[in-house]
Every structure is written in structure tokens, then in C-alpha cells.
Image (spheres, helix red, strand yellow):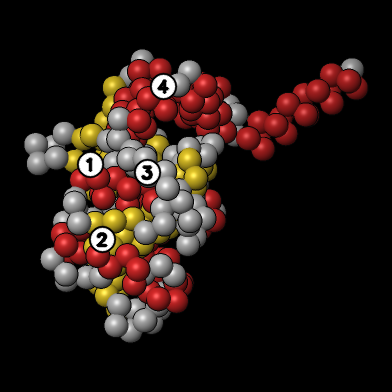
Amino acid sequence: MKTMKRSLMFGGLLALTFGVHAENSHLDSVIQQGQLRVCTTGDYKPYTFKAEDGEYSGIDITMARSLADSLGVKVDWVQTTWKTLMPDLLAGKCDIGMGGISVTLERQKKAFFSTTLDVDGKVPLVRCEDQALYQTVEQINQPSVRLVEPAGGTNEAFVHAYLPKAQLQLHDNVTIFQELLDKKADVMMTDASEALYQQKLKPGLCAVNPSQFMQYGEKAYLLPRDDMTWKLYVDQWLHLAKVTGNYQKILGQWIATPEAK
């Protein structure tokens, strides 16, 4: 009898600790509703991009559809911004945040992250002829240097933390690269994956030392902190996507690989 009581108490503690209640799990809710609500900004190639016709594309858009297929549900895209991503998740507007989201401790305080997708740190994106001018933090952190960044994300946070002396202008993340080409700005600090992708798209722009990060970073999916069952499912789905090569195949369709030197 004592053993049975201990087992019941232990099971109850586990349920309270991890929020694992089968009848109320987030996983069950997604399946029952028949839709996976995905918060995504639609402005961050190669991860998420919303075209003028409303169609989404990108690495994490394809991954979101794969996750939905594994659940037997449809995707419901929830348009968000980098400033409103966390508030939208906390308000219950979406089941997962996807689209090149960087792991930070500030975000971790309010939500779960999936297991890590990739390592992806901050590097400068500049006009190719200016690469020698912006090799270090010290070179960029100067009053004469004009930085351009999207508002509300980790790029802006990096500038405030490490490049306070430089001039900062905020710009939308779709036409921001043209600001560099038009010489209206000098440097954009961004993740190496985006810098490599944009250098492929826009001749004249170059990622500076893309394998030597000025700040270490990781990418993952953002999840509500209401249920461990949901996180465990997403983590297992992501694990299988990697070991079967599906994730690497999707990456290969988008990410530019730096040339060997």
C-alpha cells in the first residue's frame, strides 16, 4: 500500500512538474483543432518570406509544413513581427514560432525552445569593396559607421550591446539590403546564414568572415511553456528530420556555402 501511494505521489509530482496531462495537452489540442498555428515574420530569408501574393516560402516554412504533415493537420500562418513575436506566443495566438529565431536567455525566461537547429552567429554584411574596413568590432564601433538593422530582434540587441558608438538606423528587413548597395548605410550585423544567402542573391554584398562569429548564436523553434508534451513531440520530430536527412535536404535548397580558401 505504501509503495502504491509513493507511486501515485511520484506520478502526480511529474505531472505537476512537466505539465503532462494527456486530456489537456497542447499536442492533443493541435490535433483536435486540425491546424498548426505558426507565428512567423515573413521577412527573414532564407527562413521565412511572405510574397506579395501572400504565399510563404523558406527553410522554416517547409519545416512547418513537414511538422503539420506529421500531425495530420493544416498550417495556419500567423503574421507577426520581431517585436510582437513573444507577445503573440504568450497570448496564445500560435502553437510555435518559426523563421530563423535565435536562442536567447531573455526569450527562454518566457517560453520553451526546441532542440537546437543550427549554430549561427553574428557577422557583418557589407559592400564587397569595403570588407577590409569592417573586420572587427573595433572597426565597426565608430561614430562614422552607419549601421542598419531591423527593429526588435537580436541584430538590434547586438548593436546596442557591442556597437554603441556607431550610428544606428532601423529599417524593414525586406528592403534593408538595398540600403547597403545604395550606400545609405555601411554595415548590417546579422546571422551568418542570412549574410551568406543575401550575398548569393545580391551581387555587391559580402559576408565578412562568415565562419568567425562576432557573437555565438543558435537557432531553434519557439514553443509555449504550458506543456512539456508538446515540446517533446516537436523535439522528436526535429530529431527524426535530421537523422533521416530531410532537414539537411531542405537546408541545401536555400543556404549558400562559403567557398573554401
Q: Is residue 104 above or below residue 40?
A: below
The nearer-to-camera label among 1 and 4 is 4
Q: Dot 4 corresponds to which residue?
A: 246
Seen at 40% across and 76% down, the residue is 139
Q: Could you tell me the amino acid type at mark 3?
A: Glu
The Cα–Cα distance between marks 1 and 3, rounded to whole angstroms, is: 26 Å
Residue 123 picture location, percent across and down: 40, 59
Seen at 40% across and 17% down, the residue is 70
Of helix, strand and loop, which one carries label 2? helix
Answer yes or no: do the residues labelled 4 and 2 have beta carbons within 8 Å?
Answer: no
Of helix, strand and loop, which one carries label 4? helix
Q: Nearer the viewer, residue 243 or 107?
A: 243
Q: Earlier in the sequence, mark 1 or mark 3?
A: 1
Residue 136 picture location, percent across and down: 44, 70
Of helix, strand and loop, which one carries label 1? strand
Q: Dot 3 corresponds to which residue?
A: 259
Seen at 49% across and 52% down, the residue is 217
Q: Could you tell me the amino acid type at mark 2?
A: Cys
Q: Dot 1 corresponds to which residue?
A: 49
The nearer-to-camera label among 1 and 2 is 2
Q: Dot 2 corresponds to which residue?
A: 128
Q: Badge 2, how many Cα within 10 Å: few under 14, some, many 20+? A: some
The Cα–Cα distance between marks 4 and 2, rounded to whole angstroms, is: 34 Å
**Side (left or right) of 247 relative to 83:** right
Quadrant of the image containing the N terminus: top right
Of helix, strand and loop, which one carries label 3? loop
Q: Nearer the viewer, residue 227 or 160?
A: 160
Q: Earlier in the sequence, mark 2 or mark 3?
A: 2
The Cα–Cα distance between marks 1 and 4, rounded to whole angstroms, is: 20 Å
